[in-house]
Image (spheres, helix red, strand yellow):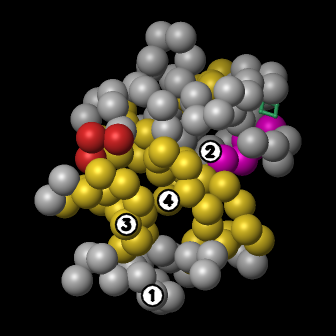
Amino acid sequence: MLDTLKRGDEEPVFLCETSALVESGLAVPFEVLYRGEVLNAFAVRFQGQVHGYLNRCVHLPMEMDFQANRFFDGSGRWLICSTHAALYDPATGVCVSGPCGGALVKIPMSEEGGKVYWHTSSAVQTVF
Ligand code: FES
Protein backbone atom coordinates (compact mmCIF):
# COMPACT_ATOMS: atom_id res chain seq x y z
CA MET A 1 0.00 0.00 0.00
CA LEU A 2 2.97 2.34 -0.54
CA ASP A 3 1.08 4.32 -3.16
CA THR A 4 -1.50 5.44 -0.64
CA LEU A 5 -1.53 9.21 -0.16
CA LYS A 6 -3.10 10.16 3.13
CA ARG A 7 -2.38 12.29 6.13
CA GLY A 8 -0.91 10.83 9.25
CA ASP A 9 2.43 10.12 10.79
CA GLU A 10 5.07 8.34 8.78
CA GLU A 11 3.01 7.74 5.68
CA PRO A 12 5.08 7.11 2.54
CA VAL A 13 4.36 9.50 -0.31
CA PHE A 14 5.48 8.58 -3.81
CA LEU A 15 8.08 11.02 -5.16
CA CYS A 16 9.72 9.61 -8.28
CA GLU A 17 11.21 6.61 -10.00
CA THR A 18 14.58 5.43 -8.69
CA SER A 19 16.23 6.32 -12.01
CA ALA A 20 15.36 10.00 -11.53
CA LEU A 21 17.96 10.36 -8.76
CA VAL A 22 21.54 9.86 -9.90
CA GLU A 23 24.60 9.92 -7.66
CA SER A 24 25.49 13.53 -6.70
CA GLY A 25 23.21 14.72 -9.49
CA LEU A 26 20.24 17.03 -9.76
CA ALA A 27 17.64 16.88 -7.02
CA VAL A 28 14.00 16.01 -7.38
CA PRO A 29 11.92 18.76 -5.75
CA PHE A 30 8.67 18.40 -3.84
CA GLU A 31 6.41 20.49 -1.66
CA VAL A 32 5.59 19.80 1.96
CA LEU A 33 3.54 21.35 4.69
CA TYR A 34 6.09 22.06 7.43
CA ARG A 35 4.64 23.27 10.73
CA GLY A 36 1.71 24.77 8.83
CA GLU A 37 3.81 26.46 6.12
CA VAL A 38 4.09 25.27 2.52
CA LEU A 39 7.80 24.90 1.75
CA ASN A 40 9.89 23.34 -0.97
CA ALA A 41 11.94 20.27 -0.25
CA PHE A 42 14.31 18.17 -2.30
CA ALA A 43 15.71 14.68 -2.60
CA VAL A 44 19.21 13.72 -3.74
CA ARG A 45 21.21 10.54 -4.04
CA PHE A 46 24.56 10.31 -2.23
CA GLN A 47 26.70 7.20 -1.79
CA GLY A 48 23.82 5.16 -3.15
CA GLN A 49 21.27 6.35 -0.62
CA VAL A 50 18.42 8.79 -1.11
CA HIS A 51 18.26 11.76 1.28
CA GLY A 52 15.60 14.41 1.61
CA TYR A 53 15.70 17.90 3.14
CA LEU A 54 13.69 21.07 3.37
CA ASN A 55 15.04 23.55 0.85
CA ARG A 56 15.84 26.08 3.51
CA CYS A 57 19.32 27.15 4.57
CA VAL A 58 20.14 27.23 8.25
CA HIS A 59 22.00 30.55 7.93
CA LEU A 60 19.02 32.50 6.61
CA PRO A 61 15.62 31.02 5.76
CA MET A 62 16.32 31.04 2.03
CA GLU A 63 16.16 28.36 -0.63
CA MET A 64 19.61 27.05 -1.44
CA ASP A 65 19.58 26.34 -5.18
CA PHE A 66 20.36 29.29 -7.44
CA GLN A 67 20.12 26.95 -10.40
CA ALA A 68 16.97 24.89 -10.03
CA ASN A 69 17.54 21.53 -8.34
CA ARG A 70 21.34 21.91 -8.28
CA PHE A 71 22.42 21.41 -4.66
CA PHE A 72 25.77 19.63 -4.97
CA ASP A 73 28.99 21.59 -5.17
CA GLY A 74 31.42 20.98 -8.02
CA SER A 75 33.04 18.04 -6.24
CA GLY A 76 29.74 16.21 -5.74
CA ARG A 77 30.72 15.68 -2.09
CA TRP A 78 28.77 18.48 -0.38
CA LEU A 79 25.44 20.23 -0.64
CA ILE A 80 26.02 23.94 -1.08
CA CYS A 81 23.89 26.98 -0.41
CA SER A 82 24.27 29.31 -3.37
CA THR A 83 23.80 32.48 -1.30
CA HIS A 84 26.82 32.38 1.05
CA ALA A 85 28.35 29.00 0.15
CA ALA A 86 27.54 27.10 3.34
CA LEU A 87 28.37 23.41 2.89
CA TYR A 88 26.27 20.57 4.26
CA ASP A 89 26.91 16.85 4.51
CA PRO A 90 24.48 15.19 2.05
CA ALA A 91 24.07 12.15 4.29
CA THR A 92 23.16 14.00 7.48
CA GLY A 93 22.36 17.59 6.54
CA VAL A 94 24.89 18.84 9.10
CA CYS A 95 26.73 22.04 8.26
CA VAL A 96 30.46 21.41 7.75
CA SER A 97 31.60 24.83 6.53
CA GLY A 98 30.36 28.38 6.20
CA PRO A 99 27.86 30.49 8.12
CA CYS A 100 25.25 27.83 8.77
CA GLY A 101 26.13 26.29 12.15
CA GLY A 102 23.39 23.71 12.31
CA ALA A 103 21.68 21.13 10.17
CA LEU A 104 19.10 21.07 7.42
CA VAL A 105 15.69 19.69 8.32
CA LYS A 106 15.85 16.07 7.21
CA ILE A 107 12.87 14.33 5.68
CA PRO A 108 12.84 10.54 5.94
CA MET A 109 13.02 8.79 2.58
CA SER A 110 12.71 5.22 1.38
CA GLU A 111 13.19 3.35 -1.83
CA GLU A 112 11.39 0.17 -2.81
CA GLY A 113 10.57 -1.58 -6.04
CA GLY A 114 12.22 1.08 -8.18
CA LYS A 115 10.28 3.90 -6.55
CA VAL A 116 11.32 6.64 -4.13
CA TYR A 117 9.06 7.87 -1.32
CA TRP A 118 9.28 10.63 1.25
CA HIS A 119 7.65 10.08 4.61
CA THR A 120 5.36 12.33 6.58
CA SER A 121 5.95 13.02 10.27
CA SER A 122 4.40 15.13 13.00
CA ALA A 123 6.19 18.17 11.52
CA VAL A 124 6.07 17.39 7.81
CA GLN A 125 2.81 16.64 6.02
CA THR A 126 1.47 16.52 2.50
CA VAL A 127 0.24 19.85 1.11
CA PHE A 128 -3.09 18.52 -0.09
S1 FES B 1 21.66 31.86 3.23
FE1 FES B 1 22.65 29.94 2.94
S2 FES B 1 24.70 30.38 3.53
FE2 FES B 1 23.68 32.25 3.87
**Residue 118 found in image quarter:** bottom left
Ligand 1 picture quarter: top right
* Outermost residue to the left: 113
What residue is disc 3 on? 14
Q: Earlier in the sequence, mark 2 or mark 1?
A: 1
Can you tell me whether the CB of the residue at mark 3 lies under 8 Å from the nearest atom of ligand 1? no
Q: What residue type is labelled 3?
A: Phe
What residue is disc 4 on? 107
Q: What residue type is labelled 1?
A: Lys
Secondary structure predominantly adopted by residues drawn in magenta: loop
At x 61%, y 62%, the residue is 31
Q: Which of marks 2 and 1 is in front?
A: 1
* Residue 13 screen position, x and y as percent: 40, 71
Q: Distance between the residues labelled 3 and 4?
A: 13 Å
* Residue 110 screen position, x and y as percent: 30, 59
Read off the magenta span.
55-59
